Image (cartoon, helix red, strand yellow):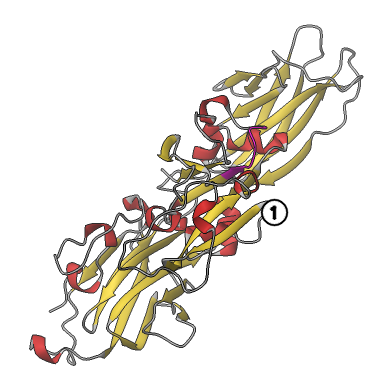
């Protein structure tokens, strides 16, 4: 028989006593909602001793809210039991179904992506032939992860200076904010469609503009005010995608200052990393090293930690270590914060990012090789070899 703990079993919950369980990735339940159903396939073997070595798995992907099938979902499966490169890529049909044929019994990683839905990722173990059902959350509803609203900056028409204290309100009077010291304002939780926004400040001629808001997107505007009742230029409008959690954490404001390196959710989805450390590949000022004791595990070293010498790690007497000499353990590793909390202190101990963070649930990443631009609350104490801030979608 096929059950949830047989066909798909997240790593964090393995407690079967047959293998050493190490801490795995932090994966909120909403990020990968998979439910399994007993398929009772005709070719399933009833005797435990005759489990087939290669089986066929059938899946169906449905909308988390309507329950309807989702066509054209890209399904990527990775694991040693597939083709030589370890990957298999299929697309769901009109009924939301896909099939993984003739795959070996073993452990796999599943990634689902669709332009209109939040991506999902998870690990599962195939032990017998069967089927399962999984859901995806629409981008514009349910999860509320994407921000719908207006973000803008107000300036003086004559000299271009930033204006703080400008009253920004919706035409119907339901919502109003004041521009801050940087001349910026944010109108959150708007519905899609046309909105009349009014701008007023003592000493300036008020103005009102109609701004179109796209569901699941942020409309950026630049507004100018004049002391004289003259014809003002139309406001400049651009549209971008923003995650609510990143907006509230100050991610986008720090990104605008130009310090550090930033990876948002949109870039993560475009790159489709299979492991967390894949996000740092090719990033200027960042090096990736393989653990000499486990070549499958990678470590991140920032520019400020490249030439720091730390106490080398000692190996057990019966462990010869890597075949070639290496000074990997003598690097200085960055401090890591996960949702604002210290997850790794850095220094002489590498952060094993691939074992406790899944890129499928990450909203954004900030990388600081120096203290420039790094918020004071994340500067910490002890050796500084760079800081990595990771924000998850919650």
| 371 up-or-down from 165: above or below | below
- Viewer-proximal residue among 265 and 317: 317
Residue at 46% across, 80% down: 87
Magenta span: 366-372
Farthest-out residue, left: 47
Instruction: Identify whether 346 is placed above or below 200.
Output: below
Q: Quadrant of residue 376?
A: top right
Q: Is residue 252 magenta?
A: no
Residue 157, percent across and down? 88, 22
Q: Position of residue 394 (x, y in %)?
A: 41, 43
Q: Which image quadrant is residue 358 in?
A: bottom left
In the rendered image, residue 2, in percent from the top left (x then y), is placed at: 16, 76
Q: Residues within 10 Å of mark 1 (few under 14, many from 20)?
A: few
Q: Seen in the image, is 57 located left or right of residue 157? A: left
User: Residue 89, relative to residue 169: is it above or below?
Assistant: below
* Residue indicated by mark 1: 284
Q: Residue at x 44, y 47 (%)?
A: 349
- Secondary structure, mark 1, is loop
Find residue 168 and report its image quarter. Answer: top right
**Residue nearer the viewer, 302 or 82:** 302
Residue located at (47% from left, 74% from top): 323
Q: Nearer the viewer, residue 176 or 172?
A: 176
Q: Is residue 305 left or right of residue 100?
A: right
């Amino acid at each position: 028989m096929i059950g949830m703990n047989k066909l798909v079993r997240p790593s964090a919950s393995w407690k079967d006593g047959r293998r050493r369980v190490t801490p795995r990735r932090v994966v909120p339940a909403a990020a990968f909602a998979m439910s399994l159903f007993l398929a009772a396939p005709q070719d399933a073997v009833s005797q435990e001793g005759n489990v087939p070595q290669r089986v066929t798995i059938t899946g169906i992907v449905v909308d988390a809210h309507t329950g309807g099938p989702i066509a054209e979902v890209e399904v990527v499966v990775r694991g040693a039991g597939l083709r030589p490169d370890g990957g298999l890529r299929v697309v769901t049909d009109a009924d939301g179904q896909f099939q993984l044929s003739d795959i070996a019994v073993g452990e796999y990683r599943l990634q689902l992506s669709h332009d209109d839905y939040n991506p999902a990722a998870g690990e599962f173990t195939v032990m017998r032939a069967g089927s399962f059902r999984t859901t995806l959350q629409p981008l514009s509803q349910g999860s509320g992860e994407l921000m719908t609203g207006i973000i803008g900056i107000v300036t003086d028409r004559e000299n271009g200076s930033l204006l703080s204290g400008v009253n920004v309100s919706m035409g119907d009077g339901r919502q109003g904010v004041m521009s801050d010291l940087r001349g910026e304002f944010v109108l959150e939780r708007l519905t899609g469609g046309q909105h009349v926004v009014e701008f007023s400040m003592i000493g300036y001629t008020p103005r009102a503009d109609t701004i179109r808001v796209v569901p699941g997107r942020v409309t950026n505007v630049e507004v100018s005010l004049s002391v004289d009742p003259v014809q003002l230029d139309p406001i400049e409008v651009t549209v971008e995608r923003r995650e609510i959690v990143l907006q509230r954490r100050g991610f986008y404001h720090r990104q605008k200052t130009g310090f550090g390196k930033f990876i948002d959710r949109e870039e993560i989805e475009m790159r489709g990393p299979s492991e967390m450390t894949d996000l740092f590949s090719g990033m200027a000022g960042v090096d990736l090293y393989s653990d000499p004791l486990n070549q499958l595990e990678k470590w991140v070293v920032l520019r400020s930690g490249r030439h720091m010498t730390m106490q080398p790690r000692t190996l057990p007497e019966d462990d010869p270590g890597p075949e070639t000499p290496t000074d990997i353990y003598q690097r200085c590793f960055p401090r890591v914060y996960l949702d604002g909390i210290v997850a790794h202190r850095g220094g002489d101990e590498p952060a094993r990012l691939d074992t406790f963070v899944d890129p499928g649930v990450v909203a954004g990443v900030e990388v600081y090789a120096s203290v420039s631009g790094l918020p004071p609350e994340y500067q910490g104490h002890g050796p500084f070899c760079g800081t990595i801030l990771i924000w998850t979608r919650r």
